[in-house]
Image (cartoon, rainbow, N blue to C red):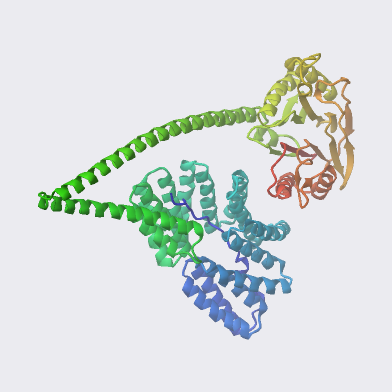
Amino acid sequence: MFCIASLTRCTTDNSEIKTSSKTEIEINSSALASDYREKAVAQFYRSEYDSSLFNLNISLKIFERDSSDVGIASIFNIIGAVQGSKGNNEQSLEYYLKSLKIYENLDDSANSANLYNNIGEFYRHQDDTEIALDYYEKAILIKERLAVKNPTNKVYQKSLSNTLNNIGIILAGTDKKEEALNYYFQSLEIKRRLEDDKGVSSSYTNIGNIYRRQDAFKEALEYYLLSLSIDRKIDDMEGIGIDLLNIGIVHMQEENFSIALNNFEKSVYIAKQIGNVKLLRETYSNIANIYETMGDIPTAYIYFKLYTEMKDTLLNKESIDKIAEMQTKYESVKKQKEIVILRTENQIKTEQSRRSQITLLGVGAILIIVIIFSLMLFSRFQVTKRQKKIIEEQKKLVDEKNKDITASIRYAERIQRANLPSKAEIDSLPFEIFVLFKPKAVVSGDFYWLAKKKGKIFLAASDCTGHGVPGALMCQTIIPHLNQTVNEKNIFNPSLILNEVRKGVINSLKLEGSEDEDDEQQKDGMDCVLMMFNIKNKILEWAAAYNPLYLFRDDELYLEVKGDKQPVGYADALDDFTNHSIDLKSGDCIYAFSDGYTDQFGGPRNKKFMPKRFKQLLLDIHHKTMEEQKKILDTTIVRWMDGVEQIDDILVMGIRIK
């Protein structure tokens, strides 16, 4: 089968195009150069590439005559984008590097960040994702800083959105599909806020690609159609062509071949009109794929040859092998037709030379050989057919089992989520709060808990033994004990609550005195920070098992109290938990968390994040809003991992007293 390909909507940063050197225009020639540049940008967005290049060259000559470095750099950047859309990759990179060199010499960090993004995009198209991510990281470090400092600046916000989108594209090509979706939705949120129709359309396309790769065809088609609606509204021909290609791929994968071909043919027409080689190449590939699936080898071969002719470089080994394979199939079909003709001619000759005994003997011998050979082929075909049927039945059984297991785990996730506080409940609390919750698997061994009773608010950040399904089962065992202790037994003292929950856990799991059980089972339970807020009196009481509690006050780490060195579960020495108390002040920031964040491996040397680095990060960001803190914590740990597998569930809870 041919490779099923779709086009991703990348976002090239030309944010500076509409702002560069505007304040420096002092003479008519510079104003004229800027007018040509603006016209070229509009043509670029309409996919009128040759016209765009013509006007860009006029603008460049004027800027060069006037020695305007800023103007020259902006033109180089736009030429790089146009050449990239035309499929001229070497020229695209050449102009991007020229532009970057000028901006770096000018110490222009904003436009340098845009060029980092565009060069990263170039390397992504070369499948060199490591270098691409390096450039994206350079870009986003600058862009996040500019966006935070200038929240109302649309250029900076759009530029940040572009790079978030492009990182999503990189991750979409790995097994980190959910992380990719996270980046796409962050980018989409900014684009919607900016009313950036073209950007919103691109995000819809990329989100649709993720759902399609997860076989969620209904959701994929929904986002592709949303993208098509916008692209038609803004008359983006390239976007319309990509949308039609992607819609066709969904129908192809659902085996709606006639609908798929109809969309592909429209995409080919648009690609030829605007001269988009990449779009034309990918559409030809998918048309060839359909015809091969339908058994029409000659037509498939024609379209695959058209696909290979669109390539910018020499055919790689895979393409050569594919052409050879298609050539063989094509020749086979052709030869079968020749055999039919030859047999007809032989029959005529046999009738004419019936009197010749030698001819009769020869024909007889040939017939015998053909019969024997046909019987052998038929026998082999029957064996292969039986083997294929057995394999298909086994695969179907395995797929059904996997589907059942996945469905069960997804259902378990819904049950677990139902036992966690809802967003509405969290938002209704009389203080600012965020919860960063990142399970290692679908279900989690970490959980957060909320209860309200008699004017008091109870919050817990808990880490049960294990993660995934075992950890989630432990959560479901412990949460009812917490609810019962507070809501039914009316125990409000945090240390007494943990003492009572520990008794319930030991009884439920039959741990105490169980000498036949192995050591691992004896360790079942949870680490926890349990807080009780008396909002009226501004008092915080808490008790903790292993995990610490941090309190920041007046821009410093005012309080760090480690938890008791015993779990909420069975231990060799069962001491009462320690109850702590402190008077709260407005502006106090309190943090409770599991060990998943600090124990995560990553960074340049693949080391743990460690508590020291975590405390410094909280010190740096605790004055920001809770939502900003959550975003920074999430982004920081994702960058820290940088492809390293998440080793444990992650839970961080932050609270600011009003």
Q: Which corner quadrant holds the C terminus?
A: top right
Q: Compared with residue 429, is residue 242 higher up or lower down, i.e. above or below?
A: below
**Residue 264 seen from this side:** no
Q: Compared with residue 291, is residue 21 higher up or lower down, i.e. above or below?
A: below
Q: Nearer the viewer, residue 657 or 326?
A: 326
Q: Position of residue 25 (x, y in %)?
A: 64, 79
Toward the front, the furthest residue is: 358
Q: Compared with residue 460, is residue 99 higher up or lower down, i.e. above or below?
A: below
Q: Position of residue 244 (x, y in %)?
A: 42, 54
Which residue corresponds to the image point at 65% horizontal and 64% vertical from the top-left? Answer: 114
Which residue corresponds to the image point at 78% horizontal and 51% vertical from the top-left? Answer: 605
Which residue corresponds to the image point at 25% horizontal and 52% vertical from the top-left? Answer: 339
Residue 243 image-quadrant placement: bottom left
Q: Is residue 84 left or right of residue 248?
A: right
Q: Is residue 405 left or right of residue 48?
A: right
Toward the bottom, the furthest residue is: 65
